[in-house]
Amino acid sequence: MISKKVRELFVSLMEAADGGPVSYEFETDQYTGYFNRVVVDKYINLGALELVEAVGDFISLLLNNRDDFLSSFAAGIREASLGNDQAYADYNAHPFAFSVGYEHFHQMAKKKRANQDYLCHGFENAETGLIHQQ
């Protein structure tokens, strides 16, 4: 099981949008926003993130192996939505990302009312009916 603070960090990257708490810049692949510095530093040391710039808790990051992370995160969401277990994580390019996506799907499913405007990589966009891609 992934801790809440860790899940929140990586989910915030997958929810990144213009005008949101975390933004994603397509030209530079940088995520910018206010993050828990302790968690960010841990994942920088583990090699999952790369620090671009930091002014206090306002941080710009790169997500290392971003393509693998995105596809595995979406695969975790897909498998969870199908009612499958996490066994498929071992066959993904990024098992950690799969697990974050899998757990995030279950956290969202616990909510009594689904947010129709919710956009997150790997989740269905209620407006278009398509899977949202970052």
Image (cartoon, rainbow, N blue to C red):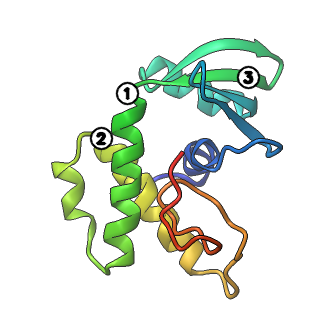
Task: Judge left or right: residue 68 versus residue 48.
Answer: left
Q: Are marks 2 and 1 in contact (CB under 8 Å)?
A: yes
Label 2 belongs to which residue?
94
Q: Residues within 10 Å of mark 1 (few under 14, many from 20)?
A: few
- State the image coordinates of residue 33 (x, y, percent, origin top left): 76, 32
- State the image coordinates of residue 84 (x, y, percent, origin top left): 26, 76
Q: Which mark is residue 44?
A: none
Q: Residues within 10 Å of mark 2 (few under 14, many from 20)?
A: some
- Mark 3, secondary structure of its residue: strand
Q: Residue at x 20, y 60 (%)?
A: 88
- Specify which label sits upstream in the sequence, 2 or 1: 1
Q: Which mark is residue 59?
A: 3
As drawn, 4 above or below 104: above
Q: Total number of numbered labels?
A: 3
Q: Are marks 3 and 2 in contact (CB under 8 Å)?
A: no
Task: Judge left or right: residue 115 versus residue 125.
Answer: right
Label 1 belongs to which residue?
65
The three-letter code of the residue at mark 2 reads His
